[in-house]
Amino acid sequence: MYRVFNHFKDYPPPYDGKPPAPLEEGKDYQTTWGASYYDSTWMGPIGNGAMEEDYEKACLPIFPIPNNYSCSVISLPGGGPTASTSGRVKLLHLDAVNRRRSASS
């Protein structure tokens, strides 16, 4: 995943791979790695299916704090008709996810 924070108006996404050469990593954009998992067998009271995204180097920049930590985002189905209420997202620090996984095994 690439998060461009400088000159994104001059070089708007989407990009075919990393951002274009005029942009410099660390100065104009940030790189992180991760994986996404979908569980079609998860069943909840208001919907089925769940998705987990694990970010290894930098979390999604969705809060007004530095995002230089690993995290996992778990999306569960919601019940509303609009994007703001159609799903619930839970953000977990990766250490908490690992503790949860260790406890269940």
Image: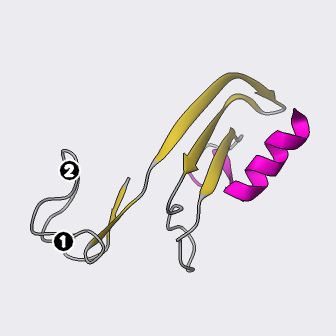
Q: What residue is shown at x 22% (from left), y 46% (from top)?
A: 17
- x, y percentage for residue 80? 67, 44
Q: Secondary structure at mark 2?
A: loop
- As drawn, is 5 to the left or to the right of 103? left
Question: Could you tell me the amino acid type at mark 1?
Answer: Lys
Relative to 31, residue 82 above or below: above
Residue nearest the viewer, comparing 86 with 64: 64
Q: What residue is shown at x 63% (from left), y 45% (from top)?
A: 86
Gap in angstroms between the C-alphas marked 1 and 2: 13 Å
Residue at the outermost left position? 22
Residue nearest the viewer, comparing 34 with 60: 34
Residue 10 in magenta? no
Compare marks 1 and 2 and give the one earlier in the sequence. Answer: 1
Tell me the residue that label 2 is attached to.
Answer: 15
- x, y percentage for residue 37? 58, 33
In the rendered image, is residue 93 in sight? no
In the rendered image, is residue 6 in sight? yes
Location of residue 43 by image quarter? top right
- Name the mark on residue 9: 1
- In magenta, the rendered stretch is 82-105
Residue nearest the viewer, comparing 41 with 37: 37
Q: Quadrant of the C terminus?
A: top right
Residue 102 in magenta? yes
- x, y percentage for residue 19? 20, 58
Relative to 8, residue 71 above or below: above
Residue at the outermost top position? 41
Location of residue 77 by image quarter? top right
